[in-house]
Image (cartoon, rainbow, N blue to C red):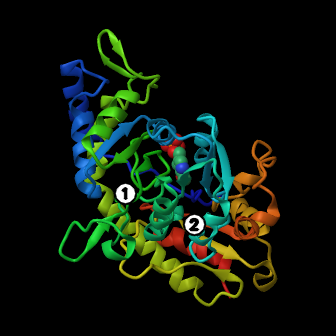
Amino acid sequence: MSEKLITVTSPLLPNLDEFNEMLKEIWASKWITNMGQFHNQLEKALAEYLHVPYVCLFTNGTLPLMTALQALRITGEVITTPYSFVATTHSIWWNGCKPVFVDIDPATGNMDPERIEAAITPATTCIMPVHCYGKPCNTKRIQEIADKYGLKVIYDAAHAFGLEVPAKEYGLPAYDEKGMAGIMNAGDMSTLSFHATKVYNTIEGGALVVHDEKIKKRIDNLKNFGITDEVTVVAPGINGKMDEMRSAYGLLNLKQVDAAIKARNEVAKKYRAALRNVPGVSFWDDMPGVRHNYSYFPIFINADEFGMSRDDLYFKMKEAGVLSRRYFYPLISNFPTYRGLPTANKENLPLGNKMADEVLCLPMHHNLSEEDIKRVLNFFKI
Ligand SMILES: *Cc1c(COP(=O)(O)O)cnc(C)c1O
């Protein structure tokens, strides 16, 4: 292949010299994991950046999902969305609970709040929505339903790093006089992933956002085997700890994440301008008043109007060295592991299935050049 490969994502990497300086500090201290100084600094810095009370760091984005369910003692049925990354449903399964799928709202890709009540049974204890592609769920409506039925709400906010919304509209506490709120204040807890493919990364990593100190202590305890002191284990915890090297890396990346989000926004603007009138291609615009993070740029292909199927387009781009991603395809409910569930059938989830069949996430990251963007858009010339 003559031209360079354009990847769908590209990791935000800290300055290597600065990282080296921090590594020297770690070497000097000989404290490499177990809640060291960089770990603790990063928790505080993230809480400030996200406008939330407490952040509990984890070693990846799946353990916080599993730990949240444990900490809230969730049992029975958990209402969730099939249109997500498999980790969402896996975490429910690993806790011995039953995933109950409800269909999405095609206007956002998120679980449709108006379909939740019909899925509630006496065994339901929790709702686990996802802010898909970093588009905010209707947190106000979901909380109303949760309160009405006495359910917990755990948000998988893996895509929603830095997402801010108008506080009143979303039923969240404002952090400034303009009335903005960090989305991570919603529900009982929210989880984050800092995997290399995400807007903000610590190589592997994640976090659980909680709203009070007592719960923070419980999570800190659960992520360290349930150990409270040398001779006391109070709960069947797990090892979810983030080490010092990745905490240092995370502190450096936090300084440049706003610039990366800005660069992504510029890419999104160019994509939108070029794709606006292409028949058979649709996409979402920014939502009014929302600070988006441009974590993904999903487009939806109507094969009849576009003159090519989504899959044909995907493979044609791939052959030319432009990697897009069919994210989320297949729908979680169609994987053999889950398709036997009573709510997994296609008749129950027509909108999620349709979106999974039409979606294509275009390359989206802070390193895309004008030339790269042109090469992507060449596949859409009218
Ligand atoms: C990335 C992701 C996760 C899992 O995060 P890891 O850090 O890879 O464990 C969970 N949920 C969603 C929606 C994700 O995109």
The kind of residue tagged 2 is Asn
Q: Residues within 10 Å of mark 2 (few under 14, many from 20)?
A: many
Q: Which residue lies under the disc numbered 2?
A: 110
Front residue of 375/52: it is: 52
Counting from the top left corner in percent of width and height, residue 260 is at 36, 61
Q: Residues within 10 Å of mark 1 (few under 14, many from 20)?
A: many
Q: Residue visible at 53% across and 41% down? A: 74
Quarter that holds the C terminus:
bottom right
Quarter that holds the N terminus:
bottom right
Residue 224, compared with residue 312, is above or below; it is above
Front residue of 88/265: it is: 88
CA gap, disc 2 and disc 1 = 16 Å
Which secondary structure, mark 2?
loop
User: Residue 262 has which mark?
Assistant: none
Question: Would residue 204 be found to the left or right of residue 95 on screen?
Answer: left
Counting from the top left corner in percent of width and height, residue 342 is at 78, 52
Residue 111, compared with residue 30, is above or below; it is below
Counting from the top left corner in percent of width and height, residue 225 is at 42, 21
- First along the sequence among labels 2 and 1: 2
Residue 20, compared with residue 189, is above or below; it is above
Query: How many labels, in total?
Result: 2
The kind of residue tagged 1 is Met
Q: Residue visible at 26% across and 30% down? A: 23
